[in-house]
Amino acid sequence: MKKVPFDLILKGGTLVTPAGLRAGDVGVRGGRIAALGKLETDAAAEAVDVRGLHVLPGAIDTQVHFREPGLEHKEDLASGTAAAALGGIVAVFEMPNTTPSTLTASDLQDKLRRAEGRAWVDHAFFMGVAAENAEHLAELELEPGCCGAKVFMGSSTGSLLVDDDETLLQAMHSGRRRMAVHAEDEARLRERLALVRGGADVARHPEWRDEETARLATQRVLDLARRAGRRVHVLHVTTAEEIPLLAANKDLATVEVTPQHLTLAAPECYERLGTLAQMNPPIRGARHRDALWRAIDQGIVDVIGSDHAPHTREEKARPYPTSPSGMPGVQTLLPLMLDHVNAGRLTLERLVDLLSAGPQRIYGIAGKGRIAVGYDADFTVVDLKARREITAKWLAAKCGWSPFEGMTVTGWPKATIVRGHIAMREDELLSQPMGRPVRFLDTLPGDAED
């Protein structure tokens, strides 16, 4: 029997490569990209016709909360990664505020074991920062399957909180990787809690957790990072006031925004969705949303993450402020952003930079983030012209809802390919979960690079 040189060929698509958009084929062998150009389909064990579609480097969501262990009634690693695959995402970075929190090497190993054979996409896990592990982060963050350290400066879902400068500096001095930061000022949150304590309209959420709460924390983390010489990644930035601070510190700080903050605006979202619109930091007014779009246009924003943080409808129905903050988003991230591409708010190439190349640069991911020979065969195949409604039936998250249900978008993921394995095609999960731990350049033997 004649041996074919490729395991898979994607035939006839428009490829989004580092050199720009080009028509052509992709040949895959052994889970990696083996050739680009015009290839014969009989040279592959399997050929997929992607004519009329765009083939993007696999989209990476670097902020998800999949709730396992301890809170699996909201989400687990199987359902969360299924949602990712259905949404065109090839890899996820999962947050440490589970039960128990991810604070030790054994906590990390437990998560990796749980993901084995159940995860539909590749994955890595953040180590949480706490007083008890701050001095050991240097070795903990280099554990295989760890994407870095995450610190909560303001209280949110879970018990992780580090709000004193001494512990923050100790953590920043321990390790070299970029540290992910939830920047809200805890002292101001406690001071202003009286505004809503005892019950209030959820529309007051951005008044309690106001712009100054975000600005103070971001300024503080930048000052501390400068003292420690530690690179930081400021998550879910929400305010116009933070943008100049972050722009002035691009040698030190990278920036994430979410599709929620780019799409929704107060007060309309709270009037329409109630507590389903409640998240931390809050959805704010249009002035702030417009500032985030300007920051994308000016290159200040480095990555878009979903901050997928599901709760059940019953939990979200509690009276504010006892209702939990957070909303699902990993499955809707790409459809929402493709809709923004179609609306002219950003280019497809800029979106690829924010969802693929940006995560690779920030976290030093090995072998992902671009369509290039030798890289992992990770692809997100999209139809830029498809008009689809986001429906509950399509959603895979355990919580069963999305703030974007009923929204019609233009642009849809048609296939998710992870290291040459087709995880999703035409809204269906295929085969079996094949996700593996993401590799990082600084944990490979001899600091080898792909």
Image (cartoon, rainbow, N blue to C red):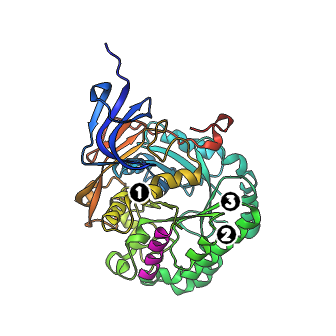
Going by the numbered disc 1, the residue's amino acid type is Glu
Kind of residue at disc 3: Ala
Is residue 70 among what the camera can see?
no
In this rendering, is residue 49 above or below 71?
Answer: above
What residue is pinned by disc 3?
A: 130
Task: Reply above or below: 258 against 195.
Answer: above
The amino acid beneath tag 2 is: Val
Image quadrant of residue 271? bottom left
Residue at the location (34% across, 74% down)? 273
User: Label 2, on which residue?
Assistant: 221
Q: Which residue is at 49% across, 52% downward?
A: 357
The span picked out in magenta is: 285-298
Q: Which residue is mark 1?
A: 349
Q: Is residue 297 magenta?
A: yes
Picture coordinates of residue 448, whole percent (x, y): 63, 36
Q: Callout 2 environment at 10 Å: few (<14), some (14 to 19), or many (20+)?
A: many
In the image, taking residue 7 as reference, residue 215 lies left or right, namely right
